[in-house]
Amino acid sequence: MDHLILAATEEGLGTCWIGAFDPEAAREVLQLPEGVEPIAFTPLGYPACSPKPKSRKELDQIVHYEHWDAV
């Protein structure tokens, strides 16, 4: 699933991992045979907008070597 999501992102598609669903309902809708257990889904499509870059802390603010420095 993670490789599929990364490949989709590389192609400009939006997606996300969905693991919270009713497996019985999914089995019925997808007409899955007995013994096939759905474990994850991912929607796939072109996003309506692109997320803005996240602000990130500098590495020296979150990494400490040998001892703890109060920031």
Image (cartoon, helix red, strand yellow):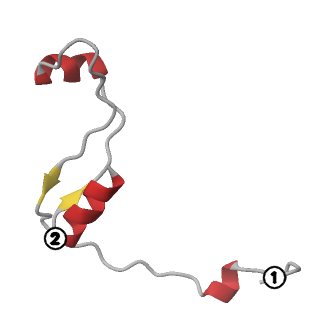
Residue found at the very far right of the displayed protein: 67
Residue 38, numbered circle: none
At x 16%, y 70%, the residue is 12
Category of crowding for the residue at label 2, using alpha-carbon neighbours closer than 10 angstroms: few (below 14), some (14–19), many (at least 20): few
Question: How far apart are labels 2 and 1 at the CA level?
Answer: 38 Å
**Please, is residue 22 above or below residue 50 in the view?**
above
**Please, is residue 21 above or below residue 35 in the view?**
below
For the residue pair 42 and 52, the one nearer the viewer reads as 42
Category of crowding for the residue at label 1, using alpha-carbon neighbours closer than 10 angstroms: few (below 14), some (14–19), many (at least 20): few
* Residue 30 drawn at (x, y percent): 13, 24
Helix, strand or loop under label 1: loop
* Residue 21 drawn at (x, y percent): 31, 29
Does residue 38 appear to the left or right of 46 in the view shown? right
Residue 65, numbered circle: 1
For the residue pair 55 and 29, the one nearer the viewer reads as 29
Place residue 47 in its image quadrant: bottom left
User: Which amino acid is tagged 1?
Assistant: Tyr
**Please, is residue 32 above or below residue 71 in the view?**
above
At x 27%, y 57%, the residue is 5
* Residue 2 drawn at (x, y percent): 35, 54
Q: Earlier in the sequence, mark 2 or mark 1?
A: 2
Q: Please give the residue where the numbered disc 2 appears in the rendered image.
A: 12
Helix, strand or loop under label 2: loop
